[in-house]
Amino acid sequence: SPKDVTKKDKTNFNLLVLALAIVGCVPTTLYFYFTTGKSVDSAWWPILAFFASIIVFTIIIVIGWFYRNLVHFKVNK
């Protein structure tokens, strides 16, 4: 974690990335609802949306971590 940054700045950045990750799952869920939810396999859309949302959530969190540590709050070694 960056050392020369206030705790409030780190917390605000982390909350922003978390909010973006949650908002990023909405289009993924809607995609599976409108495609698979209207087909013969409609019982599977919540499961597919859940697993796809896990992937999207993880990717956004990892990108946020890289951005925070390597660009926004450069880590001092």
Image (cartoon, rainbow, N blue to C red):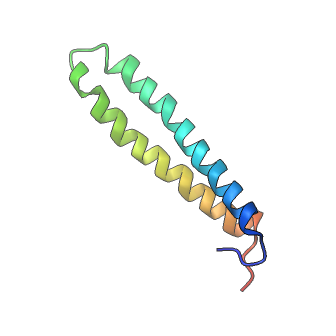
Query: Looking at the figure, which quarter contains the C terminus?
Result: bottom right
- Which residue is farthest bottom? 77
Residue at the spot x=21%, y=15% of the render? 40
Q: Is residue 13 left or right of residue 36?
A: right
Residue 1 spot, x, y in % from top left: 64, 74
Residue 2 spot, x, y in % from top left: 70, 74
Residue at the spot x=31%, y=13% of the render? 38
Task: Using the image, determine if residue 21 lies above or below residue 73.
Answer: above
Residue at the spot x=51%, y=29% of the render? 27
Residue at the spot x=67%, y=60% of the render? 11
Q: Is residue 75 left or right of residue 62?
A: right
Quarter-wise, where is residue 36 in the image? top left
Task: Using the image, determine if residue 26 lies above or below residue 16.
Answer: above
- Of 14 and 28, nearer the camera is 14
Residue 7 spot, x, y in % from top left: 71, 68
Task: Using the image, determine if residue 27 lies above or below residue 5.
Answer: above
Q: Is residue 71 left or right of residue 38?
A: right
Quarter-wise, where is residue 12 in the image? bottom right
Residue 19 spot, x, y in % from top left: 60, 43
Quarter-wise, where is residue 67 in the image? bottom right
> How many numbered discs?
0
Q: Is residue 3 left or right of residue 58?
A: right
